[in-house]
Image: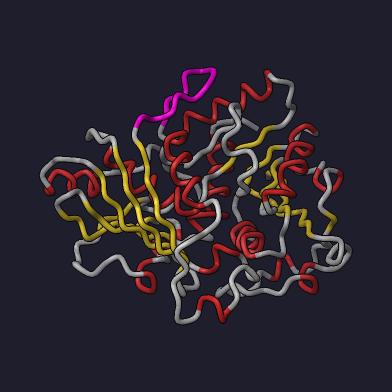
Amino acid sequence: MINVGVLGATGAVGQRFVQLLSDHPWFNLQTLTASERSAGKRYGDAVNWRLDVPFPDSAADVIVSPTTVEAVRDCDIVFSALPADIAKGIEEGVAAAGVGVCSNASSHRMDSDVPLVIAEVNPDHLGMIDLQHDHGRDGFIVTNPNCSTIMLTLALEPLRQFNFSKVFVATMQAISGAGFEGVAGMAIYDNVIPYIKGEEEKMASEPRKIMGTFNGSEVEPATFSVSACCNRVPVIDGHTLSVWVDIDRPLDEVRKAYREYRAPFSGLPTQPARSVEYLDQPDRPQVRLDRNRGNGMTVSVGRLREGLRFAALGHNTIRGAAGASVLNAELIYKEKYL
């Protein structure tokens, strides 16, 4: 078994990591860290469990450690659910100590030797782990993208066979993306907030790195542009995207590309049967009906129209955060980077 830990285990994404890892067939969840006020307590006593799934009893008696490098030295991989400002130094220290870091934080996503990975899209970018070793890092850092970037990029992946140079996207993002305390009820109830700090910039840059070409020493960014408008809406979980792409192909060809798309690997525990699923109904995808497809790991696409226009949807804390990191770690293990 691979021994793993979670940095920031009591927050929204940290809880999702704990849920996904508690009964994992490959990973043994042995270490949970949190702030000083939670350190020393049983996880079952320290956490205010807020997910819509039962609390995993197997994690209840794990004693919460402070979020330090020393706390996770005995792990093979740690999953980081830390805020970006805290994550940067801790993740660097953990990787320097010889431990692998699979991070949901944004701190290192655009570093030149750190892979920004969606497992189904750019698994070859894991070769950048070797660059980190060449640069003197005993462990490694692998990041997953921003939640909306993941939905957008997976929805674009089946379309790579067509030429496109411009992508426009409007997002309707769930409040869980801001964390438990991120948006006050009086601010979001009966409202749409047309601004999420840093989100549009991430969506403009991250897909180009993910869909770029790793030449063995660096990533050459993809040449298309992304223009994004990001909105916070009163939905608990599930980000919806309206996407426009300058693809001039018959709709039947595009539908066929979606229907025939399959991930480039199989056999990973967190991998869904369909990473991208096309829905024919004219009013789908919908958050309540489709966010949990593939145990929350499937991105649903529909409303394909001339233009080229379509809608995409994914579960932001599973596919867009913790689940993406866990899937990356499974691929890292399968590809023998540990």
Q: Does residue 104 appear left or right of residue 60 in this picture?
A: left
Residue drawn where x is 45% and y is 64% of the image: 194
Q: Does residue 50 appear left or right of residue 262 in this picture?
A: right
- Please state the horizontal and vertical placement of residue 85, each as a whole percent of the image: 71, 49
Residue drawn where x is 48% and y is 55% of the image: 319
Which residue of the protein is positioned furthest toward the front in this rendering?
194
- Please state the horizontal and vertical placement of residue 248, each as a whole percent of the image: 15, 40
State which quarter of the image contains the N terminus.
top right
Residue drawn where x is 38% and y is 70% of the image: 287
Most frequent secondary structure within the magenta stretch: loop
- Please state the horizontal and vertical placement of residue 30, each as a whole percent of the image: 76, 54
* Up/down of 26 relative to 61, above or below: above
Any part of residue 24 in sight? yes
* Up/down of 98 relative to 186, above or below: above
By what rule are the colours in the image chosen? secondary structure
Q: Is 23 colored magenta in this rendering?
A: no
Stretch of the chain drawn in magenta: 212-223
* Up/down of 267 relative to 129, above or below: below
Specify the quadrant of the image occupied by residue 314: bottom left
Any part of residue 295 in sight? no
State which quarter of the image contains the C terminus.
top right
Count of marks, rendered view: 0
Residue drawn where x is 49% and y is 46% of the image: 201
* Up/down of 107 relative to 18, above or below: above
Which sits in the foreground, 319 or 153? 153
- Please state the horizontal and vertical placement of residue 271, each as a whole percent of the image: 45, 50
Q: Does residue 187 appear left or right of residue 278 in this picture?
A: right
